[in-house]
Image (spheres, rainbow, N blue to C red):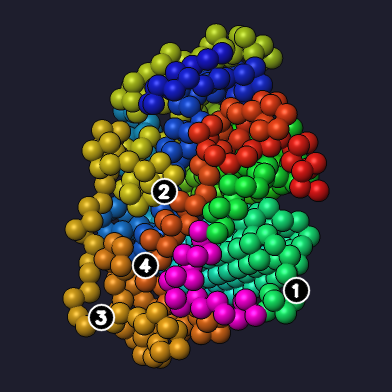
Amino acid sequence: MLKSCRQCTTKFEITDEDLKFYDKVSPVYEGKKYQVPPPTLCPNCRQQRRFTFRNERKLYHRTCGLSGKSVISNYGQHTGIEVYEQQEWWTDKWDAKNFAQEFNFDRPFFEQYNELQMKVPQLALSVWHSENSSYCNYVGNVKNSYLIFGSVYSEDCYYGSPYYSKNCLDTLVVRECENCYQCIDSRKLYECFYCQDCHSSNNLIYCFDLQGCKDCIGCAGLRNKQYYIFNQQVSPKEFQEFKKKLDFCDPQTHQKLKTELEKLKLKIPHRYMQSKNAENVSGNYIYQAKNVTNSFYTDRCEDCRYCAQVVDLKDCYDNNYTEENELCYEYLGAYQVSTTIFSRFCNRISESFYCDSCFNSKNLFGCIGLRNAKYCILNKQYSKEEYEKLVPQIIEHMGGKVQAHGASAQQTKNLASPVLSATELTKKGWGEFFPINISPFCYNESVANEYFPLTKEQVIKMGGTWKDADEINRYEGPQMKPDQNIKKVPDEITKNILTCGECQKNYKIIDPELKFYRKMSLPIPQACPDCRHKARLSMRNPRQLYDRNCSKCNQPIQTTYAPNRLEKILCEKCYLKEVY
């Protein structure tokens, strides 16, 4: 069936397969199924709403509410939420159950949940099993890293989102890379600079969509090549002579390489999507996957839809930044979760609803910060019998409907909730993720603003909050303007404050970063980490699928290249014939 998104009014389809999934994740109590209704928002608006609950990059100085120590947190003082440093949060000095609330059937659920949210302390930063990486967020098993976000198993990395990588700077979703700089959406690279969509290659400079290549400069669309400059074969001697003359401290060098690469990108054929070992999939950057629809940056997933940046998912819809999950819906962050819906940043929980930052638990409803718990509602402990009696009543209070066991997709469709206004959904809301008006983060602090940028007025109209730029503290003392020539940059630069040439915010250069630039003969960045991150984001195709036709055989395809783009876009069959 076709529905109109209640937020953007875009038409979107809900298939019989979708209805079967919603039926599958609907909870059952005493033989009655409490149906999860079809969504009222389109996939993009659902993702936007989830993203408002994730702040990766905006960090603040805070004080740990337990130890009194100074900490860094993504929860600013303006959120009103208490934070505990990592070590203190996991101790037995406090118990989230001490903030328990009795459910009040005279009040909306989300209103009561928000009260609990404002009382339970949060982790200052989400850093797991890591060492010397205190300015990182949403990371696990990282070492000696600085300002990396959403990263795992990486070492000596700075400013980016590396996975299983080492000594990489200014990256955006790179995996298994080493000694790389300004690389985007790439895998298995070694000593590559300014590259995008490259795989299994070494010693590349300003390249796009290269696989199995090495020693290439300004190239696009090559496979298994060596010693190429602007897609032309050269001798090893010619290559080394050309490379030796490149001066990356000269802005003209960058401009020339960028210009030539952009020309080549319009000449080469482009595959309609980036994927490998994928069967029956749609989206982009899908690897080792089967039956994955309208998803992006997925690895080892099966039977999933509307997901992005996920690994090892099975039978999940609307998941982001998650790993090793099964039967999860409208879920954001963390890993090893099953049969959990409308929740965020929980780890090793199951059969739970509307939860945040809960760990090693099951059978929770509307809980925050619980560990090793079960049968809790708004952090209050119940017996199994009490829990299974009260949860159905809360679901019905939220507008949920009872569905007979084994009902058909058509019967589920007939039970779908009517379209409610945003206000009504806040009061009711069963089947919807947390509403934007209870996000602890301002919209322009969150990931939502990266993928769905809005004005302050638009955000306020949606019910969100906004952090004004004039609240940002700026350093008023002496500042250094770095020399473009890295050989002339003194060691003292790491003790000075720099000002971004784009947004005028302050930033610093750290010692290992300076060492990397000197080793690789690269210039000191003239923009702050946030502006560099925005520049990398702008180079990507959107996470949006468009209907087009293959430029060669005219077969219909779905691709992230909009119809008005000038690139030559080919289907899988035609692309393989032309490239190989």
Q: Are marks 4 and 3 in contact (CB under 8 Å)?
A: no
Residue carrying label 2: 450
Residue 407: x percent and y percent?
66, 12
Q: Are marks 2 and 1 in contact (CB under 8 Å)?
A: no
> Around disc 3, counting alpha carbons within 10 Å, would you say few (fewer than 14), some (14 to 19), or many (20 or more)?
few
Compared with residue 201, is residue 293 higher up or lower down, i.e. above or below? above
The residues tagged by marks 1 and 3 sit, at their Cα atoms, a distance apart of: 46 Å
Closer to the eye: label 1 or 4: 1
Residue carrying label 3: 479
Q: Tell me if 95 is positioned left or right of 409 in this view.
A: left
The residues tagged by marks 4 and 3 sit, at their Cα atoms, a distance apart of: 14 Å
Q: What residue span does the magenta drawing correspond to?
A: 241-259
Give SS at disc 3. Answer: loop
Which of marks 4 and 1 precedes in the sequence?
A: 1
Which of marks 2 and 3 precedes in the sequence?
A: 2
- What label sits on residue 235 in the rendered view? 1
The residues tagged by marks 2 and 4 sit, at their Cα atoms, a distance apart of: 16 Å
Give SS at disc 4. Answer: loop
Magenta stretch: dominant secondary structure? helix
Q: Looking at the image, can residue 382 be seen?
A: no
For badge 2, the amino acid type reads Glu
Identify the residue at horizontal 68%, vertical 37% (top origin). 570
Q: Tell me if 375 is positioned left or right of 528 in this view.
A: right
Which of marks 4 and 2 precedes in the sequence?
A: 2
Instruction: Return the residue nearer the eye: 361 or 177.
Output: 177
